Image (cartoon, rainbow, N blue to C red):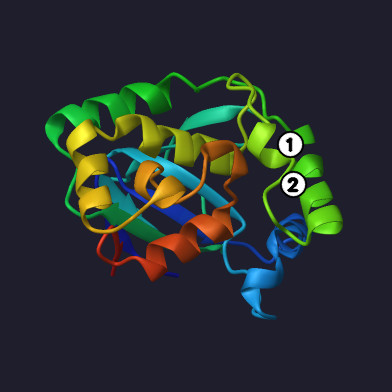
């Protein structure tokens, strides 16, 4: 099992071989994957620094499950990868990041959003058509929560720097290149891997 030290403001992604995990990854695949299998089926955010994958003092995360919870990340044999923004969040951004994440604790999972994402896969080849209009903040799914928290934390200077670096439209505006309601865990992680100037993996 991977052992990692996570900091406040990090975003994590997990890969599970459970039936639900496999179904979610199947639903995430679209034409841009070019036949490659999706890796991530879940995501969340770190609100207190600590370790993941060990009994040492553990990181505190916020993640949307059936109810959005705040506590240590329970892996149960799943693989985890962690990403950190480049440049690091400012203290002001971190405060917004944590406050926004904590605001979702206790919210009920928006399970029906998964059906809309599946409809995009079947009807539009995975393009984010229906999901872009799927905005209901009080019923988060894991990808919406993580993407919304990161997007909300960004200050104007960070967004301006992305535009100056040549990022346009959604890639210039959103933390993972797409609106939070259109995000899924694997697309978000792929964005991090494709843009090491914006997100770096914690190893």
Q: CA distance from mark 2 to mark 1?
A: 6 Å
Depth check, front residue: 131 or 2? 131
The disc at residue 113 is 1
In the orientation shown, which residue stands out farthest toward the bottom? 35
Q: Are there few (<14), some (14-19), or many (20+) residues within 10 Å of tag 1? A: many
Residue at 79% in and 34% down: 112
Q: Position of residue 24 (x, y in %)?
A: 72, 56
Residue at 60% in and 51% down: 184
Indicate the quadrant where residue 4 lies: bottom left
| Residues under numbered marks 2 and 1 in contact, where contact means CB atoms less than 8 Å apart | yes
The C terminus, quarter of image:
bottom left
The disc at residue 117 is 2
Residue at 72% in and 61% down: 18
Indicate the quadrant where residue 26 lies: bottom right
Q: Is residue 125 above or below residue 174?
A: below
Q: Are there few (<14), some (14-19), or many (20+) residues within 10 Å of tag 2? A: many
Q: Could one spot residue 6 in this view of the protein?
A: no
The disc at residue 22 is none
Residue at 51% in and 47% down: 178
Q: Could one spot residue 21 in this view of the protein?
A: yes
**Residue 70 horizontal side relative to residue 139, left or right:** left
Q: Secondary structure at mark 2?
A: helix
Indicate the quadrant where residue 76 lies: bottom right
Depth check, front residue: 194 or 81? 194
Q: Position of residue 115 (x, y in %)?
A: 81, 42
In the orientation shown, which residue stands out farthest toward the left? 91
């Amino acid at each position: 099992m991977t052992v990692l030290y996570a900091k406040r403001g990090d975003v994590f992604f997990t890969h599970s071989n459970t039936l639900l995990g496999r179904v979610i990854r199947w639903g995430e695949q679209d034409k841009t994957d070019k036949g490659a299998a999706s890796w991530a089926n879940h995501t969340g955010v770190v609100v207190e620094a600590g370790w993941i994958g060990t009994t040492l003092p553990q990181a505190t995360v916020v993640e949307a499950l059936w109810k959005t919870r705040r506590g240590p990340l329970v892996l149960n044999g799943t693989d985890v990868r962690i990403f950190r923004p480049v440049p690091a969040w400012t203290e002001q951004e971190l405060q917004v990041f944590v406050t926004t994440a904590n605001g979702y604790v206790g919210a009920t999972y928006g399970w029906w959003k998964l059906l809309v994402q599946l409809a995009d896969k079947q009807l539009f080849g995975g393009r984010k058509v229906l999901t872009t209009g799927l905005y209901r903040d009080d019923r988060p799914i894991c990808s919406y929560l993580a993407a919304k928290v990161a997007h909300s934390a960004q200050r104007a200077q960070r967004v301006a720097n992305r535009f100056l670096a040549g990022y346009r439209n959604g890639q210039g505006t959103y933390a993972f290149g797409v609106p939070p309601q259109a995000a899924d865990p694997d697309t978000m992680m792929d964005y991090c891997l494709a843009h090491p100037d914006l997100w770096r993996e914690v190893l």
